[in-house]
Image (cartoon, rainbow, N blue to C red):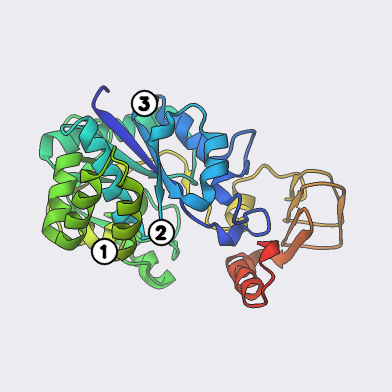
Amino acid sequence: MKNLFTLIMAGGAGTRFWPRSKAARPKQYLNIFGNESLLQSTIRRFSMFTETEKIFIVSGKDQAKVLEEQTTMLPKKNLIYEPVGKNTLPCIGLAAMFAELENPDGVMVVSPSDHLIENDELFRDTVLAAVKIAVEQNGIVTIGITPAYPATGYGYVKTAQEITGNEKIRQFKVDKFVEKPSEAIARGYIEQGGFYWNSGLFVFKIQVFLDAVKQFAPDLYADLRKIQAELGKPTFEQTLDTVYRSVNGISVDYGIMEHANNIYLVEGNFVWNDLGSWESVYLNSEKDASGNAVSGEAVVVDTHNSYVFAEKGVVALVGLEDVIVVQDGDTLLVCKRSKAEEIKKVVDQLKAGGKTHYL
């Protein structure tokens, strides 16, 4: 589509993926599956139906080197650097200001950079169904993932009436966004039906989104307009740095989606995982007869249901079960699979101890 823009948000630190994810090369720049990084896979997926000249990436300045290395297929002007991370609403608003100058009548798809998505054709059809709703209904559309189990790590979206009509992919008006629930509440959502995981994928007309920012976050809207007015001028970088640092960091869910009444959902049935931890990687990896997923040179003896990554040399496991072992350079992680979410505590301790050279 000629007027379709894509924004890929790529500024995360990926602390749960230490030791492979480090400040100079966070999670989204890693080859977790196959020969492409997660970011490169995301770009390729969207380039199936978006012109590469209209794919924008927002990241942090500290990631500029690796970002430029991995995005030679995109115009350099499409790489937008935040002076400091301010959560998703300012990030999306900043990119919308860039896209609006190119085409004020444009439609934008917003996506994280580091999710695992399969069934590319179904993904494309789902996004284009969302684009159609965004255009016809002047709505802000989210793609909801059909829950596979009572997950407690995702936000949920409760749907209202179905508006699918003759379309093959189900579509709904949204009732409300729901915060991450307990397992019991999540189980109730699934039993009740009409609830979807919040994928973090959004689609909207640029003007519809900016109108929502103006209504629900007027101070941010005014600051973004100040930044936009300086685009292309020698003073742009200074203005961006000064103004952007002063904005309130807030998610698009809190800032817009929980307040607006023109929110829609398109059902996403493609394979999706936000890859929030090494445990997610293990679950989505190919495994041997003993349930082990191995990447690199590793020897496993009497070991079961474990994930092993060896960056160089040989890693050997003997008599272990349900563990994660990741060796990267001069860093080594060994943990129970059930404790994968706590890896970020290692990063916190290394920071507190001044051992940032391991980060």
Badge 1 is on which residue? 254
Quadrant of image for the N terminus: top left
Q: Quadrant of residue 218?
A: bottom left
Viewer-proximal residue among 4 and 179: 4
* Label 2 element class: loop
Q: Closest to the observer: 266 or 262?
A: 262
Depth check, mark 3 against mark 1: the one in front is 3
Asked if marks 3 and 1 touch (Cβ < 8 Å), the reply is no
Question: With 162 as the anchor, is 183 left or right in this view?
Answer: right
In this view, the residue in front, 204 or 267, is 204
Q: Pointers 3 and 2 in contact (CB under 8 A)?
A: no
Rendering quarter of residue 122:
top left
Question: Which residue occupies 25% across, 44% down?
Answer: 230
SS state under label 1: helix
Residue beneath label 2, please?
Answer: 85
Residue displayed at 60% across by 49% down: 25
Amino acid, disc 2: Gly
**Real-space Cα distance between discs 3 and 2?**
24 Å
Determine if residue 52 is in view: yes
Location of residue 187 in the rendering, given as x and y in whole percent from the top left corner: 39, 65
**Which secondary structure, mark 3?**
helix
Q: How far across and how far down the image is residue 262, in percent?
A: 13, 50
Asked whether, in this view, residue 270 is left or right of residue 308, the answer is left
Of the residues under marks 3 and 2, which one precedes in the sequence? Answer: 3
Mark 2 neighbour density, 10 Å: few (under 14) some (14–19) many (20 or more): some
Marks 3 and 1, how far apart in space?
Answer: 30 Å
Pointer 3 residue: 53
On the image, the x and y values in percent for residue 343 come to 62, 67
Position of residue 190 in the picture relative to residue 140 (left or right): right
> What's under tag 1, amino acid-wise?
Tyr
